[in-house]
Image (cartoon, rainbow, N blue to C red):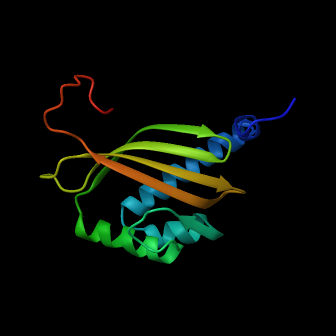
Amino acid sequence: MTSSATDTLSRATADQTEANRAIAIDFLMQASAGHARDAIRKYAAPRFIHHNPYFGNDAETLAAAMDENARSNPDKVMEIKRTIVEGPLVAVHSRVQLKPSDAPLAVVHILRIEDGRISEFWDVAQPEPVDSPNRTGMF
């Protein structure tokens, strides 16, 4: 019998799973609050990469962009709605409001955490529609 990628990912212990969840949440909350450089220093692996197409893929460039976003949006609110953890991968589904007058965003961050450090990072965002036919909404 061969093992699948999911089998391999699922072998994390409950303690590892919860530690990875806590790292992802702390990293995102610090970065959202304007402390991305500190969060990167604390959590980024030496070969950290991210996949945001708008910035260079290194940790310093991402931290600078995240900190600038926090400075430009001092009233930003990030509300984590749910997390999903499978082995080293953590998905965080959040509602982010940059400014009180802006439409909220549905954001999903995916982090690969290895040995307590974030080695890889993805993010996708979508504006929350004002008038949606879906009564259950995005959250």
Q: From what the image shows, is residue 6 above or below residue 109?
A: above
Kindly give the residue lying farthest to the front in the view shown: 2
Residue in the picture at 50% in, 38% down: 83
Residue 58 vs 10, above or below: the answer is below
Q: Which residue is drawn at 54% across and 37% down?
A: 84
Residue 13 horizontal side relative to residue 113, left or right: right
Going 44% across and 71% down the picture, which residue do you hit? 63
Residue lying at the far right of the rendered structure: 1
In front of the other: 85 or 77: 85
Q: In the visual, does 112 lie left or right of 38? A: right
Instruction: From the top left corner, tell me how far across and down residue 92 is, in percent.
Output: 47, 44
Percent x, y for residue 44? 59, 66
Relative to the observer, which residue lies in front, 72 or 53? Answer: 53
Q: Pick the residue in front: 44 or 127.
A: 127
Which residue is located at x 75 percent, y 36 percent?
Answer: 4
Q: How many numbered marks, from 0 up?
A: 0
Can you give x and y, in whole percent of width and height, for residue 119 in the image? 63, 61
136 displayed left or right of 2: left
Q: Which quadrant is home to the N terminus?
A: top right
Quadrant (top left/top right/bottom left/bottom right) for the C terminus: top left
Q: Position of residue 105 (x, y in %)?
A: 28, 47
